Every structure is written in structure tokens, then in C-alpha cells.
């Protein structure tokens, strides 16, 4: 028997974690389902930190679920077919027949088989938590109850596309600064390991007393030349261990809170979180999900542990009839614009619509702040690179001048 650490969702919507003994991962998942819970993750417990990290990295290469973009495309296609009057079984058959790869076809085959056996679509989707998150399942369940599946899937596809666009904006904007940083590091390493060693024999033959800066650069170049591979391996192992450490809630909470407090990055993170919160909440409320249930789903998709406390307090406030805006304002996490629009939505009984309006505004603010951040990063990296290269060249010139003095 092996101990498995698991994460699951109860019938009441709460996330639970624990450890169970089972012969295999499949048996552990089956045990979780027998308890009436929806399994999210089950992995062997008790292995070392590094071993767990390596297993996670290798496991990510063997993807079993669908990619985010694949789910978005399938959702859009299914909404179009249902909106055109196709029944669910025929639409699912078309998706299976036109699946882009065997992995997608296997997942869709399993969902279609479950639906043909009499299961509701949201039940079939809930059996694939690695592909369809709780938000997705919750919206489909509400749509099936309201008899408006095609429209809900269209809104869900729009939500996923907007989230993807938000992430793509951040990723695309960081490509140039990242390439510039790599070029700067590569130039410095090249100078230290290839250019500087060409002058070392000259210095040694003349027996000149080198400046401290030049001697420090020679030492750094020797370390990179002799131990560069070990340093690289050490950095990779350190990254794996850091990623595994971030899976621990105290460490992740500290990291998330620190990000929100940073001068420039913190403001950008607040805009991103506000956009995600408002977009998800507005979509859920617009599809008929009750406020308390919507807040429970939003809690699972917000992605920042430092914000969860504020969301929990706002949920309790909403249960007591006091609303969300006042509690969220006291937490001082979301921008004032988001709080104002949420308060206006509560006062006019249009919380869902105003949340979506706030999401559009904050998504635009994210794009503006990202552009400003890139405009700031590029000259900073350029200046730092220039200073570093100038420092190396200056050290070489000082050493050469000392040789000239010795010759005279």
C-alpha cells in the first residue's frame, strides 16, 4: 500500500485535502469518489522534495487532459452547433470525428459515452477535472437547469478567450525584455570566458600587479569556464525545488502577498486579479448561478492565496445581506474603480452586468500598464547591460595601462 496525498471538492463545493492509503493512483481516485467527492489531484506522499519536483516536471510532459486552447475551441464549436439546432449527441459525434489528435478524441469519446448512458453533460465533464475546471462544470450545470446550453457555452467560450487574450498580452509583452536580458547575460559570459582569457597570459608574463577589478573578473571567468555546467545544473535543481516549495500554502501565500506589495508589479497584479474576478463573477451571475455559489467558484479560479481571505470575508458578508463591495473595499486589494462599479451593480440590482463592465475596463488597464512596464524595462536592461560591458572593458584598459607603466 502507498500513501497518496489528494485534493478533492465536496458536494457542498468546498476544497479538501488529505492523505489516503491505496494500491495505486486509480484506487486512490476511486476511494475519493466513493466518499462522494470530486477528485482533483492524487499523488504519492512521503517522497523527498526534489523527487516530488522532478516527478511533477516529468508528469507535465505526459499530458492527459486537454489544453486550455483546445477546451476553448471545442466550447466554441459546440455552442455554434447547438445554436444551429443540432442535438447534443450529434454535436458531440461531430466533435469526436473532427478531433485534432488522439488525446482530444479519447476525452471527447468518454464524455459522449457518458452522455449516451444517461449522464448529464455537466456530470460527464466533472469526471475530467484535468480538462474541465469547476468554473466550466458549474456554468454547464446552471445552463442545463435553465435550458439555455448553447448561449451559455458561447459566453463561456468568450470568457476563456478573454482570459487567454489577457495572458497572451502579458506573455507577448515580456518576450522582448526577456530576449534582451538573455542577450545581455550571453554577452557578459562571452566576454568573461572567451575574450578576457586571451589577455591573461600577457598579464602573467609581465608579472604586473593587476587592479582588483581585473583580478575579480579573471576569477569570475575561471569559475564560469571550469564550473559553468555545475552552476547550470544547480540552477535547474534550485528552480525545481523552488517550484515544489511554492506548492506549500505558507510559502505560496507569502509569495502572493509580496507580489501585491511590489511598487510596479503589485499594481499590475491588482489589475489582473480585478479583471479575472469581475469577468468570472459577471459570467457566472449572467448565467443564473446564485451569488454565493458564484463566489465559491470564483474563489477556486482567482489564483492568488493572499486574495482568498478577502473573498471569503466578502462571501460571508453577502450571506448576511451586507453585499460584496463594502467588504472588498476594506481589504484594499482591488482597485477603487472595480469597487465602485461593484457597489453600483449591487445598488441597481445589476451586479453581473456591472462586473463584466468592470472586467473590460481593467483588462484595458492591464494592457496599458504592460506597455508602460515594457517601456520602462527595455531602457533599464539596456543601461545595465551597457554598464556591465563598460565595467569589463574598463578593467581591461586599467590592466593594460598598468603594463604600459611597467614597461616605461
Image: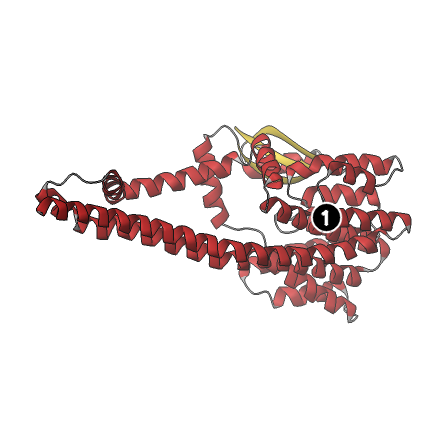
Residue appearing at x 23%, y 52% in the figure: 194
- Give residue 52's position: percent from left, percent from top: 47, 35
How many other residues sit within 10 Å of disc 1, few (<14), some (14-19) or many (≥20)? many
Side of 244 where 19 appears, left or right: right
Is the residue 200 above or below the residue 10 in the image? Answer: below
- Give residue 89's position: percent from left, percent from top: 73, 63
Q: Which residue, as the protein is rendered here, is positioned at the far front?
A: 408
Choose top left, top right, bottom left or bottom right for residue 215.
top left
Secondary structure beneath label 1: helix
- Give residue 338's position: percent from left, percent from top: 76, 49
Side of 349 where 56 appears, left or right: left
Is the residue 266 above or below the residue 151 in the image? Answer: above
| Residue 406 visible in this rendered orientation of the protein | yes
| Residue 109 visible in this rendered orientation of the protein | no
Choose top left, top right, bottom left or bottom right for residue 248.
top right
Q: How many marks?
A: 1
Residue appearing at x 18%, y 48% in the figure: 401
Is the residue 9 above or below the residue 347 in the image? Answer: above
- Give residue 105's position: percent from left, percent from top: 59, 60
Residue appearing at x 80%, y 43% in the figure: 293
Q: Which residue is mark 1?
A: 277
Give the image's coloring scheme: secondary structure
- Nearest the viewer among 88 and 326 is 326
- Nearest the viewer among 34 and 256 is 256
- Nearest the viewer among 324 and 199 is 199
Amino acid at each position: 500500500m502507498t500513501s497518496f496525498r489528494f485534493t478533492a471538492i465536496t458536494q457542498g463545493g468546498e476544497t479538501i485535502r488529505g492523505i489516503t492509503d491505496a494500491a495505486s493512483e486509480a484506487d486512490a481516485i476511486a476511494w475519493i469518489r466513493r466518499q462522494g467527492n470530486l477528485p482533483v489531484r492524487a499523488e504519492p506522499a512521503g517522497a523527498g522534495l526534489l523527487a516530488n519536483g522532478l516527478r511533477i516536471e516529468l508528469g507535465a510532459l505526459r499530458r492527459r487532459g486537454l489544453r486550455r486552447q483546445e477546451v476553448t475551441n471545442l466550447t466554441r464549436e459546440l455552442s455554434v452547433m447547438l445554436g444551429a439546432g443540432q442535438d447534443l449527441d450529434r454535436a458531440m459525434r461531430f466533435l469526436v470525428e473532427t478531433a485534432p489528435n488522439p488525446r482530444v478524441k479519447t476525452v471527447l469519446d468518454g464524455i459522449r459515452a457518458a452522455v449516451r448512458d444517461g449522464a448529464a453533460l455537466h456530470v460527464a465533464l466533472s469526471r475530467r477535472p484535468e480538462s474541465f475546471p469547476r468554473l466550466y462544470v458549474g456554468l454547464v450545470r446552471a445552463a442545463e437547469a435553465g435550458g439555455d446550453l448553447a448561449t451559455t457555452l458561447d459566453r463561456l467560450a468568450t470568457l476563456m478567450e478573454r482570459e487567454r487574450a489577457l495572458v497572451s498580452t502579458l506573455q507577448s509583452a515580456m518576450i522582448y525584455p526577456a530576449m534582451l536580458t538573455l542577450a545581455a547575460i550571453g554577452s557578459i559570459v562571452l566576454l568573461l570566458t572567451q575574450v578576457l582569457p586571451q589577455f591573461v597570459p600577457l598579464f602573467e608574463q609581465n608579472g604586473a600587479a593587476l587592479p582588483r577589478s581585473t583580478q575579480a573578473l579573471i576569477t569570475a571567468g575561471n569559475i564560469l569556464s571550469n564550473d559553468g555546467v555545475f552552476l547550470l545544473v544547480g540552477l535547474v535543481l534550485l528552480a525545481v525545488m523552488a517550484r515544489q516549495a511554492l506548492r506549500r500554502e505558507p510559502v505560496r501565500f507569502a509569495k502572493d502577498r509580496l507580489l501585491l506589495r511590489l511598487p510596479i508589479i503589485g499594481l499590475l497584479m491588482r489589475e489582473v486579479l480585478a479583471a479575472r474576478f469581475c469577468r468570472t463573477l459577471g459570467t457566472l451571475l449572467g448565467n443564473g448561478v446564485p451569488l454565493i455559489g458564484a463566489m465559491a467558484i470564483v474563489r477556486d479560479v482567482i489564483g492568488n492565496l493572499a486574495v482568498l481571505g478577502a473573498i471569503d470575508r466578502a462571501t460571508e458578508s453577502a450571506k448576511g445581506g451586507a453585499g460584496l463591495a463594502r467588504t472588498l473595499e476594506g481589504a484594499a486589494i482591488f482597485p477603487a474603480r472595480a469597487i465602485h462599479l461593484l457597489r453600483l451593480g449591487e445598488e441597481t440590482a445589476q451586479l453581473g452586468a456591472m462586473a463584466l463592465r468592470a472586467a473590460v475596463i481593467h483588462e484595458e488597464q492591464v494592457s496599458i500598464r504592460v506597455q508602460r512596464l515594457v517601456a520602462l524595462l527595455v531602457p533599464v536592461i539596456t543601461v545595465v547591460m551597457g554598464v556591465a560591458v563598460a565595467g569589463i572593458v574598463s578593467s581591461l584598459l586599467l590592466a593594460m595601462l598598468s603594463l604600459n607603466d611597467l614597461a616605461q
